[in-house]
Amino acid sequence: MGEADSQQVVLELAELRNLIESHDHAYYVLDDPVVPDAEYDRLMRRLQDLEDAHPQFITADSPTQRVGVAPTGELADVRHGAPMLSLSNALSESELLDFDRRVRERLESGGLEIGEIEYVAEPKLDGAAVNLRYEQGRLVLAATRGDGQTGEDITHNARTIPAVPLRLRGEQWPEALEVRGEVFMPRAGFDEYNRRALETGGKTLVNPRNAAAGSLRQLDPKLTAQRPLDVFFYGVGEIQGGPPIVTHGDTLEWLRELGFKTCPQWQVVTGIGECLNYHERTGEKRNELPYEIDGVVYKVNSLQDQAILGTVSRAPRWAIAHKFPAQEELTVVRTVEFQVGRTGALTPLARLEPVFVGGVTVSNATLHNMDELARKDVRVGDTVIVRRAGDVIPEVVKVLHERRPEETRPVSLPESCPECGSEVVRPEGEAIARCVGGLVCTAQLREGIRHFASRLAMDIEGLGIQRVEQLIEAGMVKSPADLFDLRAEQLTELERMGPKSADNLISAIDRSKTTTFGRFLYALGIRGVGEATAAMLAAHFGSVDELVDADDERLQEVDDVGPVVAAQIRAFFREQHNRRIVERLLACGIDWPQPRDSAAGRKPLTGKTYVLTGKFEGMTRQQAKERLVESGAKVTGSVSKATDAVIAGERPGSKVTRAEKIGVPVLDEVSLRNLLRGSGES
């Protein structure tokens, strides 16, 4: 083929792809098709024929490439450019009023005069959250939400969804753009899929939400392509470039211009009264919508106000999900079992006659603890009301005593652990009973190792729950310390563990030895000691020995540590087997940078408050936060006059603008490192 012929083919391919992309956008995003199906099919056949004849000209964003890659062996982990935050819930009108009050009070504390807040309201879809990354206008990565920092790579599966743009429309694209959306299965598609499955003897789907999440995690994208998935986009994550946008509503309009499908029911409302009206109207037409929803989401419309409000934990202070009232159904208790958790707590669980409630089929419901079980007097054979509210674990609300069979008997606490046979004790005055088996209990060992290796703890990549179970079943791991004695040749004995995978896991275990004191404490799984409390304990005490020797009074000097948590910390370290495991872990080489104390014995950054923004070259923001906290500083998510400095890396966000506006110093990464060495200025 001559050069002129090649150019002609390339031009025709580009024209066909643009035309088909335009028709896809009209059909799947605008819901306004402009050509009949026969014409669309003719264009697609012509494109396929040309690409078959000239495979060297196939591009990744061609409409023909939505499906076609080979099944993967696993879903790889990918880190989001910006965290995917989760939403706090309001389950009542009063909780929503409290949210609005907190928003106004926080904005007023920044010196602003606040009237009624303008919000963007939209239905809360019952699907699966995704993060799509576009570079130079083309889709390069799609991931599940995961833990908010890291998700699973589902790029090939996302490409099969017709409403996902393979390339952006228009020409003024950001250099890089992360777009957040909710993948869902429309009611009609769900019903049709199940109808065909029944006709062909295939497996039916349980509910639209699980169907959407499961479809995205298929290893073979051809299977995903068979599922009738759709998506609405609701926000952005990391963005490099782009037009000046001042409201969330503007963001949604801009996304639509780029070719993203947004929920047609979104609306700007002013004041809490309009929020409640929107919630009521949406609830009334909930069953008429073509997709499942479980509430309404409100977001402060002003992006500047969002930046001022900031975040708390992993949730934004500027948004909330207003859930619909719980949905309830009647069913019968088949049996009551006891599950053993990571801390040895025994939780009574009702096994139920399956019942469809709140959009899912429910066959289990929590009974919480022995006090609740006794209060509700749930017995095997009882007819009960079961409730499911949003994502909350289903629970037994009430027993219909008038339907109780005569032969029923009260459920009693087992004397021995159903997992390991160890004694079960219930301290006086406590609602929770616990197995005393500790790390000899399979249930506690499995969950304890999983927690120890988790991302916010020791962060051992590749050590998921299935691999943990393999190690335990093979007798290779009987405590967290055993992980550091593993050898690659041992691991190759495990199923689906080749030499390369074994070497990778051993390397990941070795890398985890360099950590922080806070992560190490969190990894131990001490009752009541979460990620934040562990960081504060680490900053206050500085070493394991100091923490072990601390009495209740010293422990309670730490923020968030009250009498109960202090007692739990002391109880943990009183147990000799716990002490031995900690000693073994430290002897294995686990270590962390030691913060430099001042002459007065205090941490060098005690009393200082910092805000981090942007991307740092030598460390992640999480690592920077941990090192600042261990040096005595407090790290917050929003800038205020109480902030000592904003520390900005590359491509900082609006926090720098806010800091400059109110006179808060802005430091760079060099200054951060000086601070951590104890020689910088704050």
Image: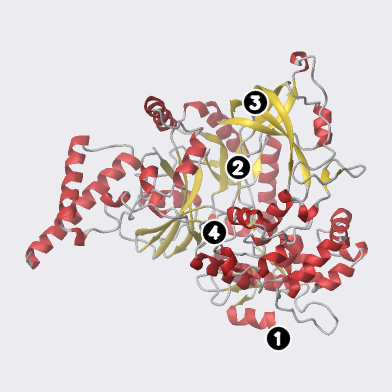
Give the mark nearest the N terminus, 2 or 1: 2
User: Which residue, given by chain and number where applicable, does mark 3 sit on?
Assistant: 328
User: Which residue, given by chain and number where applicable, does mark 1 sit on?
Assistant: 679
Give the mark nearest the N terminus, 3 or 4: 4
Q: Which amino acid does label 3 sit on?
A: Glu
Give the mark nearest the N terminus, 4 or 2: 4
User: Which residue, given by chain and number where applicable, does mark 4 sit on?
Assistant: 150
Q: Which amino acid does label 1 sit on?
A: Ser
Element type where label 2 sits in the image:
strand
Give the mark nearest the N terminus, 4 or 1: 4
Q: Which of 220 and 171 is in front in this view?
A: 220
Q: Which amino acid does label 2 sit on?
A: Ala
**Residue 5 located left or right of residue 522:** left
Tell me the quarter of the picture where residue 362 sits: top right
Check if mark 3's residue and mark 2's residue have beta carbons within 8 Å: no
Q: Whole-Å distance between the Cαs marked 2 and 1? A: 45 Å
User: Residue 166, image x and y in percent?
Assistant: 33, 53
Q: Which residue is painted at 92% across and 65% down in the image?
A: 551
**Residue 485 located left or right of residue 572:** left
**Which image quadrant: the C terminus?**
bottom right
Q: Nearer the viewer, residue 129 or 305?
A: 129
- For the question of whether residue 632 can be seen, the reply is no
Give the mark nearest the N terminus, 1 or 3: 3
Element type where label 1 sits in the image:
loop
Tell me the quarter of the picture where residue 658 sits: bottom right
Mark count? 4
Q: Which residue is painted at 72% across and 83% down in the image?
A: 678
Q: Whole-Å distance between the Cαs marked 3 and 2? A: 20 Å
Label 3 crowd (10 A; few <14 / some 14-19 / many >=20): some
Q: Whole-Å distance between the Cαs marked 4 and 2? A: 23 Å
